[in-house]
Image: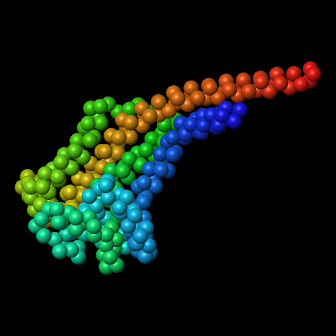
């Protein structure tokens, strides 16, 4: 009897998860997006061990380089390499590690635990998941086509790949994606130098990461969520039927038992 009740409880929990999966995703993925911003708050409040745990937890997911990350509680939201209190060299590995391990200080603020690209990518996913959650109960949302998915992902692939090639071939501060001379040469509109050079907020590189992050969010949610929703609904219907049959059989067993006692 105990095993039967335990199995029934497990089925009910599973059914609840299947019918509330989108809410669970928004809460859990929202926390996942929020924690990188908690790290600089903890540093500001003096809880460095807590901040260090968050930085360490997100380290495998991102390069965490300071010149491509947001800072909180400082004069600027982002800083160029020259503005950071670091002795950077011409060595790619040394610079990468130095920028990754630098988390900030009282003068310039503290670094968010992952880069601006990650903020845009996963932030866009959460936003479009929330939009999907608002629309899905009222309209049947069809998944986007594979072609649309690929086209939306192309800016992310192109931007990420060219940045990687640029960093390995010309270094973090000398590659073609850091100076963007190629863009200045073909752009008919004369723009300030700061738009082309570096990764600070407002630069070409920053705008590219924002645009490609939004494309990533739309592509991921648009392709995957309608498929997940269909699967969850199908399984929840099956479980609901099993639960109803079990409750009906349990009710009949109770009535038969009561009838037997009365007959006695």
Residue 112 or 158: which is nearer the viewer?
Answer: 112
Look at 30% across and 45% down and name the residue there: 215
**Image quarter of the C terminus:** top right
- Residue 226 visible here: yes
In this rendering, would 255 be left or right of 230?
Answer: right
| Relative vertical location of residue 25 with respect to residue 70 in this rendering, above or below | above
| Relative vertical location of residue 7 with respect to residue 97 in this rendering, above or below | above
In this rendering, would 141 be left or right of 240?
Answer: left
Residue 54 image offset from top left, x and y in percent: 39, 62
Residue 198 image offset from top left, x and y in percent: 17, 63
Residue 49 or 75: which is nearer the viewer?
Answer: 49
In this rendering, would 157 be left or right of 20?
Answer: left
Q: Quadrant of residue 206?
A: bottom left
Q: How many marks?
A: 0
Residue 149 or 262: which is nearer the viewer?
Answer: 262
Q: Quadrant of residue 201?
A: bottom left
Residue 17 image offset from top left, x and y in percent: 55, 39
Look at 20% across and 57% down and name the residue there: 205
**Image quarter of the N terminus:** top right
| Relative vertical location of residue 47 with respect to residue 26 in this rendering, above or below | below
Residue 75 or 254: which is nearer the viewer?
Answer: 254
Q: Residue furthest left?
A: 185
Look at 47% across and 45% down and name the residue there: 25
Q: How was the colour assigned to the protein in this rendering? A: rainbow
- Residue 190 visible here: no
Residue 78 image offset from top left, x and y in percent: 28, 67
């Amino acid at each position: 009897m105990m095993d039967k009740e335990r199995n029934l409880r497990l089925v009910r929990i599973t059914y609840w998860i299947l019918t509330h999966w989108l809410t669970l995703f928004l809460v859990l993925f929202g926390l996942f997006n929020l924690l990188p911003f908690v790290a600089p708050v903890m540093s500001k409040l003096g809880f460095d061990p807590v901040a260090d745990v968050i930085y360490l937890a997100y380290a495998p997911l991102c390069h965490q380089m300071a010149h491509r990350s947001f800072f909180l509680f400082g004069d600027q939201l982002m800083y160029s390499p020259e503005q950071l209190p670091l002795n950077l060299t011409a060595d790619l590995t040394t610079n990468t590690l130095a920028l990754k391990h630098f988390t900030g200080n009282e003068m310039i603020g503290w670094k968010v635990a992952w880069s601006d690209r990650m903020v845009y990518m996963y932030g866009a996913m959460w936003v479009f998941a929330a939009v999907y959650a608002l629309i899905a109960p009222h309209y049947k949302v069809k998944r986007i086509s594979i072609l649309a998915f690929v086209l939306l992902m192309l800016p992310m692939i192109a931007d990420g790949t060219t940045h990687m090639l640029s960093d390995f071939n010309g270094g973090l501060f000398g590659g073609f994606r850091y100076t963007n001379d190629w863009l200045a040469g073909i752009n008919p509109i004369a723009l300030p130098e700061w738009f082309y050079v570096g990764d600070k907020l407002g630069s070409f590189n920053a705008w590219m990461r924002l645009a490609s992050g939004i494309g990533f969010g739309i592509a991921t949610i648009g392709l995957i969520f309608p498929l997940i929703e269909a699967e969850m609904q199908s399984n929840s219907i099956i479980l609901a039927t099993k639960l109803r049959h079990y409750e009906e059989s349990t009710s009949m067993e109770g009535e038969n038992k009561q009838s037997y006692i009365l007959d006695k």
